[in-house]
Each structure stands twice: as C-alpha cells, then as structure tokens.
Amino acid sequence: MRLFYAINFKDNIKESLNENINEIRKHTLRGNFTEKNNFHITLVFIGECEPDKLESLKKVAENTVSKINPKQMKATVNGLGTFVRPGDELLWAGVKINPEDINTINKINKNITEELSEYNIKISENNKKFTPHVTIARRVEFKTPKNLNNIKFEPVNFTIDSLTLMESIQEIKISGDRQYTKIVYNQVYEVKF
C-alpha cells in the first residue's frame, strides 16, 4: 500500500478548485492536471507500507489528534506557484492559514512523524519542510512566458476539521488503443477534530 496523511477536502471545495483548473488550462499547452477527486494537502508522505501496518497507522492519526487536540481551522487556497524539477514543472496553489493555526498544523505534522517512529514505520525520504499547497498539475507547459499573475484564480475558503490517512492507487486504463496509468487517492481512515 502506498500511503500518506493529508488534509482532505469536501466535495464542494474540490469542485471549486476544479473550476479554477478550467481557467488555468487556457494558459497552458499541456499538463497532467489533478483530477477533481484527488485534491488534498499532503502532511506526511509514508510511501510503500505493508497492509499489516494499517492499524498502527490509524492509531498514529488517533494519537496525534488526541495529543494535539486541534480545533477546526479556517484556511484559503489562493495564488499559484511552481516547483521546477528536471523534466517537470509542477503547478501548485498556495494555502493560507493564520499563524496560530499553521503552528497547530506543524505540530500535527511533527507528531505524526514522531509517532510513526515509535511504531517503527519509516517515512519516505521525499518529506521536506511542510509547505501547505495543493498540486494543480504536473509537467506543465505554458503557452507564453510564464506569468502566474496573469492567471485568474478564485480563492477557495475551506475548513480543516480532520486528519486523513490516504492511499495512492495506480489504475491501468485504456482509451482507444492507448493504455495509461491513472492515480486515484482513496480515503482509508479519518479522525475528526
């Protein structure tokens, strides 16, 4: 199982983010855009994990929420940015969280990592300093020289009210005579605040 902890969005928030993608597409030649149901904010990426660890991973989520005792938090997805890697430009939307609440999110992030260590569950080396963002597209190529300020992005307000354990599944799909891999993110477990 390929697993990660995330802040998941309700369907109406995913729909609003998807509406922004329609505007962004007008400014690109191509890109692997995130499907509506896959929008989330990754907190800690675990990577491949044996199914027998699932109960421990659920316990980590429960223990973290119990220890930190977070309250519901208001946040906004707003503004675009990119990460540039060899052969790939990733387009993301920033997440604005007030300073007190971002401190709580950072505590959640840190506690998850510490709890995983106590359960002898290793996390992926891909984890870096937590920067809240929503991946909009990978392998983006813009029509004109990139100026993200020219792309209209309607802010999306949402409430953070749970910690979610997610699974990343690769599904093989066929379209005509072409076979491709589709990534699907499924909620495995959720702990409400």
Image (cartoon, helix red, strand yellow):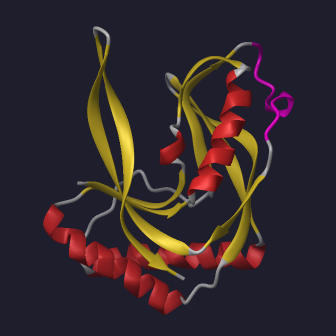
Q: Residue at x 58, y 73 (%)?
A: 106
Q: What secondary structure do most residues of the magenta stretch adopt?
A: loop
Q: How many numbered circles does the render carry?
A: 0
Question: Percent x, y for residue 86?
Answer: 50, 25
The image quadrant that residue 72 belongs to is bottom right
Q: Nearer the viewer, residue 74 or 79?
A: 74
Q: Is residue 159 visible?
A: yes
- The residue most toward the top is 177
Question: Percent x, y for residue 181?
Answer: 31, 28
Q: Quadrant of the N terminus?
A: bottom left
Q: Taking 35 as reference, is 155 above or below it?
A: below
The image quadrant that residue 158 belongs to is bottom right
Would you say residue 148 sits in the magenta stretch? yes
Would you say residue 123 sits in the magenta stretch? no
Q: Quadrant of the C terminus?
A: bottom right
Q: Residue at x 30, y 45 (%)?
A: 169
Q: Is residue 133 visible?
A: no
Q: Residue at x 25, y 69 (%)?
A: 121
Question: Percent x, y for residue 129?
Answer: 55, 60
- The residue most toward the front is 12
Q: Residue at x 81, y 30 (%)?
A: 151
Region of the chain picked out in magenta, as a range: 144-153
Question: Percent x, y for residue 162?
Answer: 52, 74
Q: Is residue 37 left or right of residue 185?
A: right
Q: Taking 185 as reference, is 131 above or below it?
A: below
